[in-house]
Image (tube, rainbow, N blue to C red):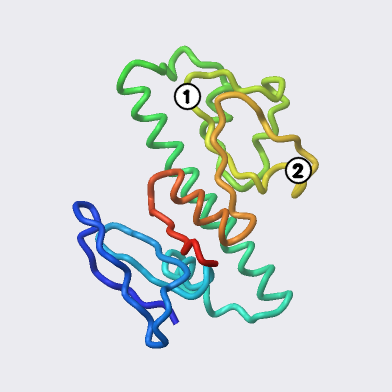
Amino acid sequence: MATAVETNQTTTITPSPIREDGASWPYALLVADETIYADSLTELVAHVIEGYDAFADDEEGDVLAFLTRVDSASSIAAQSQAVVLAEMTESGEFDPETSTETILTALLTPRGTGLVDGSDFGGNWDNPVPLLLLTTDYAPFTAYTLITGNVEYFDPSNERTYLESLQKFGFVELFVNADI
């Protein structure tokens, strides 16, 4: 079972607590001012996605967990895309008034829908605004090839890549005990 410890990790790194059996926790997740120590990645994802740990430990539960990660990642990618677009517009690096419908559609299409297939721009995104997409909208999950160029991918395909993507986008810090 995961344990949450409120910390001040932004200024000081403190040693992780030891479990009752004397062993170190295999995983830790730093979220804002709280560090979550856990025995499994599932426990960490459950801290980020409410109810995630309630899925059955069977094939149906695995499918529901996957779909839940994709849904969460879609929302995070869309919100992150909006923030990046707003920042670059405000700084003058991007002007929506002079952009084509193809560019605006790619930037504003909901994520997790598979609707940004790259065909409108030759599969290579060379716009100064990075395109934030989900790996699960492309092969091997769909028939679409990954888009190349100025693209950042959020990968919800499994728990580890989901958490690593949250880290890449600056939402959390994931720590894995070197002994596992």
Decide if residue 10 is on the left or right side of residue 27. Answer: left
Name the foreground residue: 79 vs 69. 69
Name the amino acid type tagged 2: Ala
Q: Which mark is residue 176?
A: none
Decide if residue 47 is on the left or right side of residue 162. Answer: left
Tell me which residue sits at (28%, 72%) in the image. Answer: 5
> Relative to 70, is 39 above or below?
below
Picture coordinates of residue 127, whole percent (x, y)? 53, 19
Cα–Cα gap, marks 2 and 1? 23 Å
Tell me which residue sits at (69%, 28%) in the image. Answer: 118
Picture coordinates of residue 153, whole percent (x, y)? 57, 40
Q: Residues within 10 Å of mark 1 (few under 14, many from 20)?
A: some
Name the amino acid type tagged 1: Val
Name the foreground residue: 1 vs 97. 1
User: Is label 1 in a helix, a strand or a loop?
Assistant: loop
Name the foreground residue: 179 vs 5. 179
Picture coordinates of residue 106, whole percent (x, y)? 58, 30
> Relative to 95, is 178 above or below?
below
User: Is label 2 in a helix, a strand or a loop?
Assistant: loop
Determine which residue is flagged by label 1.
129
Determine which residue is flagged by label 2.
139
Picture coordinates of residue 95, whole percent (x, y)? 41, 16
